[in-house]
């Protein structure tokens, strides 16, 4: 992908994994506050967490969540029945991706062979 705005700092990290921890709205909220603190990122609003509450396909039930950052935001998508999650960290401030991966892995009880990630 060609960087068409090299003068604008952007760091993006996609993490996808199968998790073992039970997830609810409080767990998601605590994850957002924990990872932002761990990475030195500042929030300016509370997490927004949605659950389709039975609407749509059963296999897609879970959560869609976002927390706004001073320097962009973090999105989290959870498929409850598959115990699968997808996190997108998008910032205009540099962070250490290994710290984000390790924190996410430990927080959600992810096994090493059940996680994939990509920076772009």
Image (tube, grey):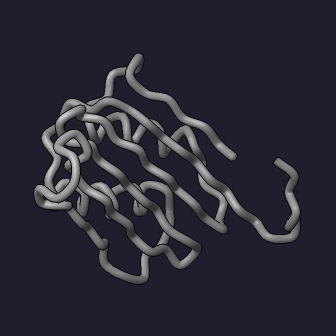
Identify which residue is drawn at 30% across, 73% down.
48
Whole-percent x and y of residue 62? 21, 50
Identify which residue is drawn at 54% across, 45% down.
14
User: Which residue occupies the foreground of this view, 11 or 5?
Assistant: 5
Q: Residue furthest front?
A: 56
Among the 4 quarters of the image, the one containing residue 27: bottom left
Among the 4 quarters of the image, the one containing residue 58: top left
Whole-percent x and y of residue 33? 32, 64
User: Which residue occupies the foreground of this view, 78 or 36?
Assistant: 78
The mark tally for this picture is 0
Q: Residue furthest top?
A: 113
Identify which residue is drawn at 22% across, 39% down.
59
Whole-percent x and y of residue 37? 40, 62
Please state if 45 lies on the left or on the right of 98 as rendered.
left
Residue 33's place in the image compared with 111, above or below, is below
Please state if 56 lies on the left or on the right of 34 as rendered.
left
Residue 34's place in the image compared with 101, above or below, is below
Among the 4 quarters of the image, the one containing residue 118: top right
Whole-percent x and y of residue 72? 56, 72
Identify which residue is drawn at 67% across, 56% down.
11
User: Which residue occupies the foreground of this view, 40 or 50?
Assistant: 50
User: Which residue occupies the foreground of this view, 4 or 6?
Assistant: 4
């Amino acid at each position: 992908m060609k960087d068409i705005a090299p003068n604008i700092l952007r760091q993006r990290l996609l993490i996808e994994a199968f998790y073992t921890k039970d997830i609810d709205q409080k767990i998601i909220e605590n994850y957002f506050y924990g990872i932002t603190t761990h990475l030195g990122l500042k929030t300016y609003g509370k997490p927004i967490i949605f659950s389709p509450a039975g609407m749509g396909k059963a296999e897609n039930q879970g959560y869609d969540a976002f927390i706004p950052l001073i320097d962009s935001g973090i999105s989290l998508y959870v498929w409850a029945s598959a115990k699968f999650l997808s996190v997108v960290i998008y910032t205009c401030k540099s962070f250490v991706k290994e710290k984000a991966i390790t924190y996410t892995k430990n927080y959600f009880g992810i096994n090493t062979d059940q996680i994939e990630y990509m920076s772009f």
